[in-house]
Image (cartoon, rainbow, N blue to C red):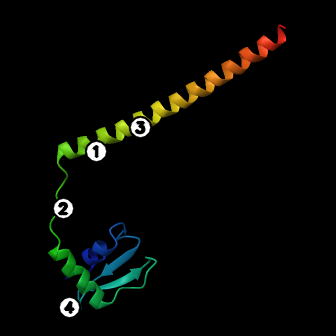
Amino acid sequence: MNIGEAILFKYPTADPTKDFIVQNNGDGTPSYIAEWNIRAPIPTEAELKTWWEELQSTSAYEPPVQVDLLARELSQEKLARKQLEELNQTLGSELSKIKLQLLTLQGGQGS
């Protein structure tokens, strides 16, 4: 079992140089967690084994297909465009109201 990889499986954003340090003294004893700076209890041997087994049974990461990435990006752009169109429509409506108010005020002063 690789303790560091097991921990990273459970805490994927952890930094193995700051959040935890796994040490092996080279004297035949197993590796161990020398430092633990994650806001969670230090994992037990059983937890580490469970995480390691889950990691081993998880299929390898497959990058997304380029078409899927483009579709996602297009969808985000469409949403942003729709939001801008709605904002423009709202601003146009408000501007029309202000123009009407000005014309009404100007018409009332001329009488």
Of 33 and 53, nearer the camera is: 53
The quadrant of the image that shows the N terminus is bottom left
Q: Residue at x 62, y 23 (%)?
A: 95
* Residues under numbered marks 4 and 2 in contact, where contact means CB atoms less than 8 Å apart: no
Badge 1 amino acid? Arg
* Residues under numbered marks 1 and 2 in contact, where contact means CB atoms less than 8 Å apart: no
* Alpha carbon distance from label 1 to label 2: 19 Å
Badge 4 amino acid? Gly
For label 1, the residue is 72
Badge 3 amino acid? Ala
The answer to which of marks 2 and 3 sits earlier in the sequence is 2
Residue 59 in the image: above or below residue 40: above
Q: Residue at x 28, y 44 (%)?
A: 72
Which residue is at the far front?
Answer: 111
For label 2, the residue is 61
Q: Residue at x 26, y 77 (%)?
A: 6
The answer to which of marks 3 and 4 sits earlier in the sequence is 4
For label 3, the residue is 80
Choose mark 1 or mark 2, whichever is in front.
1
Residue 2 appears in the picture as rendered: no
Badge 2 amino acid? Tyr
Neighbour class for label 3 at 10 Å: few (<14), some, many (≥20)? few
